[in-house]
Image (cartoon, coloured by chain):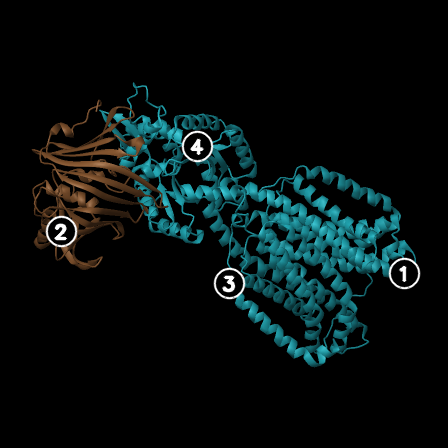
Amino acid sequence: MKKLLIVFGFAVITLKLFAGDNVEARKIFENSKQKLSLRNVHLVLDLQSFDAKGNEKTKSMDVSFAEFGEEKKVMVEVTAPENISGTKILTTDSKDQKGIIEIYMPSTGKIQKIRANQRNLKMLGSEIPINQFSSAVGADSNMNIVGEKSINGTLCHQIKMQKEDEKEYDVAYISVDQERLVRIETFDSRDNLVTQTDLSNYMKVEGIGSKMYPRDIHVKNLKSGKSSLLKVRQVDYLGNLNINDFKLSSAS
Amino acid sequence: METLIKKYRFLLLAGIIVLAALSFMQFDKLRINPSFNDYIPSDVGNRAYMQKLDSIFGGNEKIMLIITNDDGIINPESYSHLVHLTDELADVDGVERSLSLRDVLEIKLEDGFTSFDPIIHEIPADSTALRNLENRLLNNEMGKRFVSADLTATAIILSKSNDVADNQIIPAIQEVLLQNPGKDQVYIGGLSYIRQSIKSYIKTDLVTLLPAALILMILMLYFSFKEWKGVVLPFVVVILSIIFSFGLMGLLGWEISLISVLLPIMLIAIANDYSIHLVNLYQEKYKEGKSTDLKIIAVAINRELRKPIIITALTTIGGMLGLLSHKMAPAAQLGVLASFGIGLALLMSLYLVPVLLSFYPKPRIRKRDHSGKKSFIDRILTLFSDWITQSPQKVLCAFALVAVISIAGLFLVKVDTNVESYFIGKSDIKKGIELVNEKFGGSQYVSILFEGDVLAPETLRRMDEYTHKIQGVEEIGHIISPSIFMRELSKGMNTPEEAGYGQLPKTEAEAEQYFELLSMTGYDGQVSQFIDYNYEHARILVSLKDGSNRTGKKVLKALKEITEGDPAVVCIAGPGLSKIQIADMVIHGQISSMILALAIIFILLALIFRSFAAGTKGSLPLLLSSLFLFGLMGFLNIPLDIVTAMLSSIMIGVGVDYTIHFLWRYKAEYASAGDRNIAVARTLETAGRGIVFNAFSVIVGFSVLIFSSFAPLRFFGVLVVVSIFSCLICALLLIPAIIIVYKPRFLES
């Protein structure tokens, strides 16, 4: 999911070519992105999170992605469980403003604001980094094909993505035949695998041509032992966007 | 015996060599386990609750790395080193959490933004800004845990996973420290490190004390008998009994503990006694000149000494078996292994020693000094004889007085099973323990576990109330409480002007939404140590300022009083309280083992002398020595611990021999002289001398423990010397005085 969200970022910014970048790798990656429905969509999903001991928490959410000019917005509304139901998280990115995350807490009726660049930000109680809602993330990575590997029986291109000034890197697995994003792995500076995100069970998004979306996104943090399973129950194309649906107010 | 020597002596030797080789092969299975917690029953009390706590919150044990710099720890170089170490240590297998100053958060609402920012971004160069940072650190609830009040030390606190062994995690941590040197001094603290250190100290003790005791034994034997035969025969018996006992230990899968260090020392001190008597008699027989054939002498010494040797060995084994009543497995195991070793030493003394003796050629024994000049020991024994025959009542009164004074000392005996007190001198581990306790409020934690709707306002309010009360308990160092954290969290949700600032959430939903917001920031890992994943359990963690039993008991009592009647409180438990459970087992084991040992000795004495009175009178020296021993411990402030709790059984088992030797000889002397005073004097002159040498050989054997790396073993070494000496004095003064005054019939019939 983490890398899927990176893709969201990629989808809304102009592609930049970097020195040392492998054209073929970027082309494959871009093709896989093109197949995904990444903007102006509404998702209804269930998020199961597990700690290292296997304890489980389940949340249901509505998530909407939209673009209004140069402003990109992601609205998350928690619909279950009861104690946090009604909590809304709005992430806004624009050229002139670094990402801002606003959280409406129904218990207090107040809106708390957090800067999206704050490190470690994650999607509510999950292993999914929330800062990937920001459009700036991941845009400046170099890409290289490092080989091919079979993932769950599907032969995939292995594409290494690394920022120039960082030792940490990611590896994306994109199926050779359908050019679908199948897995994303993140590695620390010592080449230790930290997280593994599997995207599977792709479904067609109605109303937007041949765009697809994965039904199941499974993120495992191998360091903490925590994991999250995101099950998308419904994907809709948002044809008529209303900016008022992407605003929070303390009265909401 | 004759047949054995003539026909089967090679077979016997071959058999023993094979058995010794088989036993030696079991050594591979021997493992050191320095923790006594593993021997606490897992289904009851603190240990059972700790398992529950572990299953909810993960590892309860903390390993603390203390980094010190006398010029001040808040400086760029030290901080950079600290951050680097924190990261590196987080990657060590078995480290669940690695927290340091780097992770101290400042939660605030500023310019309309909630921030959970690390309190340190960088160490300011400007002195005013530095002082400001230092003040913020010292006033930050979380910061107080990681920096000392004098700002000369900082801590990295590691949460250890239950699944990882000390011998894996500690060397890995040490390797990280080795690979990342800095200008500051780094010390390690925490129970895991202490246990690992105990393990290496046990190894050191085994490889230093064992040879030292053997060398002492060789020297003592050589200077006693003036011929190598007198050294080799007892030495072989001792070495074989040690090999067989440790072989049995490996075979049974028992682990080497701190107590196990006593086993070889005990065998060195005790197992040679029987062969010493045999060698002594062989020298006497050879000197008499009736026969110079060592085969004939070997048969004769076996025949003459078989009965007294068997009796004294059985009584010693009886005393050792008293240890079986200990609930603490290593103590009971020591009883079995020591009894096994002594039993084998008895058999080898009776059969192997005569067989080995039969192989020797005729010896050249130096003539002894027959100038008639009395030795120091002889003069002392004569003095004893005079006191007893002239004023037996005074002697008895003197012993009664000692008994009364000792009883007073009994009330001063304290029990301390704190592993922190095992270490002596100025070692790094001692320094680490002191730093952790003095500057960081201790590393031994106790938890108050709550169950139910732990985020409900009423539950949080009660936790808050308890937290305030706990802050007033003098013995408690740090408090990690959900209510403190909630109050801090509210500062990120409200401005100081708002009513909710620094307050607890008003509803359960509000509390849960606070945590959800926190979980978004990635700092939920810090909450997981006191509130579980599903908000069904919470705990208040408190650290003990020191690891003593006194502190543990006081804190437990205070926490019980504070939380009394709270239906949500499930238990109060933690590694800091294990010692109390161990202490209860030590006290119970001490009392029961002493009673069992005395009962066994009583029965054996009654059977040997066929008299009930022999049982009571013969047990008196042991009772008095026990009183004296514990009285002395009380007056000298020596605690009863897991090692010193072994003392009474060992003392009873070994010390009774002197009484038996005395009574045995007195009976013969009285039958010969028909006069009590003469019989007592003769017994002291003859058997008394042997008893003194016997006691001294035991004292010398045990005395090496005084050089142990552990305080309890050192105390044990001192106390066993004192108690054996006490048994010796009782056998040489109290027993004859009782005989003169009370004229026991079982000795005169």
Q: Point out the tag, 4 or 1, that comes first from the N-terminus.
A: 4
Q: Position of residue B47 (x, y in %)?
A: 51, 44
- In the rendered image, which residue does mark 2 sit on? A143
Q: Colour of chain B?
A: cyan
Placement of the N terminus of chain B among the 4 image quadrants: bottom right
Q: Nearer the viewer, residue A252 or B165?
A: A252
Q: Nearer the viewer, residue B544 or B359?
A: B544
Q: Are marks 3 and 2 in contact (CB under 8 Å)?
A: no
Q: State the CA–CA distance, disc 4 to disc 2.
A: 49 Å
Q: Residues within 10 Å of mark 4 (few under 14, many from 20)?
A: many
Residue type at mark 3 is Lys
* Whether marks 4 and 1 lie on the same chain: yes
Q: State the CA–CA distance, disc 4 to disc 1.
A: 75 Å
Label 4: chain letter: B
- In the rendered image, which residue does mark 3 sit on? B29
Label 3: chain letter: B
- In the rendered image, which residue does mark 4 sit on? B479
Q: State the CA–CA distance, disc 4 to disc 3.
A: 43 Å
Q: Colour of chain A?
A: brown
Q: Residues within 10 Å of mark 1 (few under 14, many from 20)?
A: some
Residue type at mark 1 is Ala
Identify whether B457 is placed above or below B709: above
Circle 2: element type: strand
The numbered mark at residue B295 is none
Q: Residues within 10 Å of mark 2 (few under 14, many from 20)?
A: many
Q: Position of residue B46 (x, y in %)?
A: 52, 41
Identify whether B370 is placed above or below B161: below
Q: State the CA–CA distance, disc 3 to disc 2.
A: 54 Å
* Whether marks 1 and 2 lie on the same chain: no
